[in-house]
Structure formats: C-alpha cells, structure tokens
C-alpha cells in the first residue's frame, strides 16, 4: 500500500463544497495530506493519479455516485473506504458496505466523528500491513483454506483470495478466538476501534461477516467455518493445533 509510512494521504469526494472545505482544513491541521473531488469521475481520476491511503466517498454525487466509485476501486484495490450517506433507509446505508466499503458515517455528522473513524480505520490497516501476530509460521490449514496470518494472505483451493485489511483483521480476530462466541459490540470495538452508539452501528459487523463468508465458505448460506452464535454474535469453528510446539498444521474440529 502506497504512502503508509509517510504522510498519509486522504481523498475526500463530496459534491458539497462546504463539506470538502471543512474536512480539508481540519484533516490538514491534524497532519494528513488531503485531496478533494466534487464528483465520482474526479474521484476516480485522483485515486489513480495520487494513490491515497484512504478514500471518503459521499453516496449522492454527480457523474458517478459513491456506490459506483466504490465498486470501481474495489476491482483493483483494497484501500480503506468510508462512505458518507444522507439516506435514511437502513438498506441504503449498508449498500456501500456490501460493495466493499470498510465503514460509513451518516449525514449530518460531526467532523470529529469522521476524524475518529479515519484514525481507527488507518490504525487497523497499519496493523494489517506491519504486524506479525505469530512468532511461528502462522499458517493455518483448515480444510480447503490456507490462512497465512503473518503474510496476511488467504488461499482457497490454492487460489489467492483478496481480502481488505479490515476483512483480514476480522478473520484474524475470529481465528484467534476460535470456538469462543464474540459479540457484535466486542468485534466492532476490537476491529473498527469504536463503541457503537446505535444498534445500527453493529450492522457493519454483520455485512463484513457476510463478505467473509461469501469469499471463504463453499456455501455461504450454510457456513461451516464462520458460525452465528444465537443471542451473542459470531464465532470461528473451533480449531485444534496438532503439535503444540509451534507446528503450523491446524485441523478443524466441529463443535
């Protein structure tokens, strides 16, 4: 990922000039390099030219809306994306998540709230790129999956599966607590870095779980790896390490 070790670059795409101006000023003051775009076409042009570290997309933009920009970016990049939406319907709010966004903020919003979300997402992405969770090889072979924690790579039937940084962090959290149910609130706090203020906030977790299942499970509608814990949240199927002396071979045990 470009620019991660230097000054982080953020692209703000919103057709409201007042929002672009306020966010550019505030984010620049706290140390980010900020690019702005008034529409979807300009956003995609700047994305390809400047290679930002994070993109903030308004849903309702001219030429190409935020959903379309998100789809185009996800075809080639796992860069963090935060959606801004003024749409009141819950389904509309989570559409961006289903298309690959990492988080969303509802308009009208406090600039401080967006700044906090940006910091949280970038911090989690830094963890994705620069941390080594396991001192051993950190390779999990679970049925048809090979999960390399340290290299942040997942293979399904020997084919590389692309995960965003947030998706991998979620998967890593589930695996490290395999067999233990985790609440949506606990997952949100650990992976996204903030406490939900509304019940709707935890839908971010639900959509990311659905995205992981779609990428990893043979039959996402009947998952065998990432299970729903009724009344609690989610858990990864319990796994047992065959050799306790840091043998990377892990096998699946049904629970």
Image: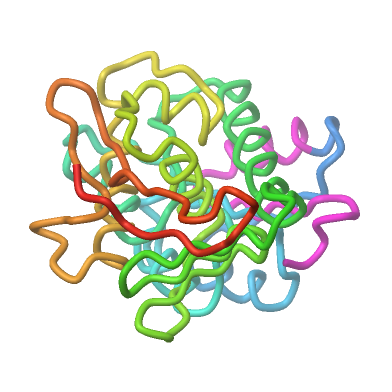
Residue occupying the point 37% across, 62% down: 65
Residue 146 falls left or right of residue 138: left
Q: Position of residue 155 (x, y in %)?
A: 45, 76
Residue occupying the point 34% across, 50% down: 97
Residue occupying the point 81% across, 43% down: 32
Which stretch appears magenta?
A: 1-27
Residue occupying the point 16% across, 61% down: 220
Q: Is residue 242 above or below residue 142?
A: above
Q: Position of residue 49 (x, y in %)?
A: 72, 77
- Of 162 and 115, nearer the camera is 162
**Residue, far right:** 6
- Of 69 and 215, nearer the camera is 215
Q: Is residue 35 above or below residue 216?
A: above
Quarter of the picture holding the C terminus: top left
Which image quadrant is residue 3 in?
Answer: bottom right
Taking the magenta stretch, the answer to whether it contains residue 34 is: no
């Amino acid at each position: 990922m470009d620019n991660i070790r230097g000054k982080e670059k953020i692209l703000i795409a919103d057709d409201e000039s007042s929002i672009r101006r306020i966010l550019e000023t505030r984010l620049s003051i706290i140390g980010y390099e900020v690019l702005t775009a008034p529409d979807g076409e300009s956003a995609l042009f700047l994305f390809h030219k400047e290679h930002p570290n994070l993109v903030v997309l308004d849903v309702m933009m001219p030429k190409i809306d935020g959903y379309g920009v998100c789809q185009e970016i996800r075809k080639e990049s796992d860069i963090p994306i935060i959606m801004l939406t003024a749409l009141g319907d819950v389904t509309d709010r989570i559409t961006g998540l289903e298309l690959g966004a990492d988080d969303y903020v509802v308009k009208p919003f406090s600039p401080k709230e967006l700044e906090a979300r940006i910091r949280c997402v970038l911090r989690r992405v830094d963890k994705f790129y620069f941390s080594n969770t396991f001192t051993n090889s950190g390779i999990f072979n679970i049925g048809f999956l090979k999960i390399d924690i340290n290299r942040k790579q997942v293979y399904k039937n020997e084919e590389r599966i692309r995960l965003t940084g947030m998706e991998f962090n979620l998967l890593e959290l589930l695996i490290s607590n395999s067999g233990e149910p985790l609440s949506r609130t606990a997952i949100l706090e650990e992976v996204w870095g903030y406490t939900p203020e509304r019940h709707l906030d935890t839908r971010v977790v639900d959509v990311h779980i659905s995205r992981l299942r779609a990428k990893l499970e043979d039959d996402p509608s009947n998952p065998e790896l990432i299970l729903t814990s009724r009344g609690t949240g989610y858990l990864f199927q319990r796994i047992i390490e065959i050799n306790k002396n840091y043998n990377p071979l892990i096998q699946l045990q049904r629970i």
